[in-house]
Image (spheres, grey):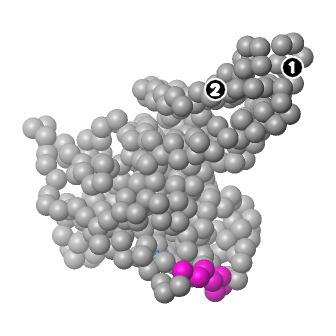
Amino acid sequence: MSDALQSELQARLSALVDPHTGQPFAEQIRLSLRGDRAAVRVQLSYPAAGWHAALVEMIEGALCHDGQVSAVTVEIDTELVAHAVQDGLSPLPGVGNVIAVASGKGGVGKSTVAANLALALQAEGARVGVLDADIYGPSQPRMLGLEGKPQTTPDRRILPMRAHGLQVMSIGVLVQVDQAMIWRGPMATQALQQMVSETQWSDLDYLIVDLPPGTGDIQLTLAQRIPVAGAVTVTTPQDVAVDDVRRSVAMFNKVRVPVLGLIENMSTHVCSNCGHEEAIFGRGGGQRMAEEAGLSLLGEIPLDAGLGRSTDTGAPIVAADPEHPVAQRFRDIARRVGARLSLQARNQTIRMPKIRIVE
Ligand SMILES: Nc1ncnc2c1ncn2[C@@H]1O[C@H](COP(=O)(O)OP(=O)(O)OP(=O)(O)O)[C@@H](O)[C@H]1O
């Protein structure tokens, strides 16, 4: 086979667009030709186990459609690295990347999204933890079905609890929630910071932090003091919500944390009887809101009774019913979150072990 064919096919592959980053694969994809047989190697920097089969099909489609190549083998390497955090902060030991899940106001489903996003990143192949910092309404113990109290090490560090394969810590298992509710800002932030610094995470690629809703002093202080690689903001479709989104983005901009994008929750309504999905607030609102706030839309989650029920009873839908369409939407969002984060600057100070998934 000629060099010209090798170059032509390599150019075709390099021009393929990764739907999760929105960018061409470029140098992340390498082709070697032997006769009319192609061996392709792809380097991904976010977890995407649920998408590998589709990626292989995409590559085969690009190479085989005109009969110049008879067989293709594809090898997919995944390397998850740590990304930069705010100036002056050191990364949390045992954690590659902290991703904060925020919302401009309460009740939009931030905790539901945080729990399912964590499980979805895990299902895509990453090692994941959840830190529930929502001091005024810690929902992760209920959502992830935590029972009992965490253990401590002889040097008084707190060991995360385990739920559905995740490492989890919640302010709800450390302090009495009714007491915490009346704490003033500085006490609340001190307790949260103590939980962050004293928990002994082990080998995590991502730690999802469920922040308290809103954009007040506590949220700002946490966004300033927890070493965060990226944030996602959760909203509902009503027109008035765009101001909440803007406030949330402004808060992260102030502390120089990149906002990876927007997740629209309850975007449509799925009928529990017939499964019909209706856009009760109209279509395209999430996309418009994301554009108005200068963000990418990471995905839309419908209002679905099954999602609410499963999450409220300790078995979030991504773990309990992985084939459910809503679970699949969370998987897609998780890949986008990982992909958007992979475009951010790297943190050169920590080395993470390389994960290698070969197809
Ligand atoms: N897409 C959805 N479909 C059905 N129920 C949902 C959905 N999202 C959230 N819920 C339900 O709405 C309620 C509130 O959700 P959640 O606790 O996640 O909100 P929140 O934004 O974290 O609230 P806050 O931070 O104010 O405590 C929960 O009972 C949850 O199960």
Q: Residue 263: say if magenta.
A: no
For this view, does 336 lie left or right of residue 59?
A: left
The answer to whether residue 233 is above or below residue 16 is: below
Real-space CA distance between mark 1 and mark 2, rounded to the nearest whole angstrom: 17 Å
Q: Which residue is mark 1?
A: 5
Q: Amino acid at mark 2?
A: Thr
For mark 2, does the 10 Å Cα neighbourhood hold few (<14), some (14 to 19), or many (20 or more) residues?
some
Q: Secondary structure at mark 2?
A: strand
Q: Is residue 338 visible?
A: no
Q: What percent of the width, then of the height, locates residue 337?
A: 56, 51
Main secondary structure type of the part rendered in magenta? loop
- Please tell me which residue is depicted at 59% across the width and 34% down the height of the picture: 44
Residue plotted at (48% across, 84% down):
272
Which amino acid type is marked by label 1?
A: Leu
Mark 1 closeness class: few <14, some 14–19, many ≥20 residues within 10 Å: some
Residue 25 visible from this viewpoint? yes
351 relative to 313, above or below: above
In the rendered structure, the answer to whether residue 283 lies left or right of residue 339 reads right
- Ligand 1's image quarter is bottom left
Dot 1 lies on which element?
helix
- Give the camera-side residue of 269 and 260: 269
Q: Is residue 327 above or below residue 26?
A: below
The circle on residue 75 is: none
Residue linked to disc 2: 73
Relative to 5, say whether 54 is above or below: below
Q: Which of 112 and 289 lies nearest the eye of the viewer?
A: 112
- For the point 75% across and 39% down, the residue is 61
Is residue 279 on the magenta stretch? yes
Q: What residue span does the magenta drawing correspond to? A: 275-281
Residue at 83 percent of width and 13 percent of height: 1
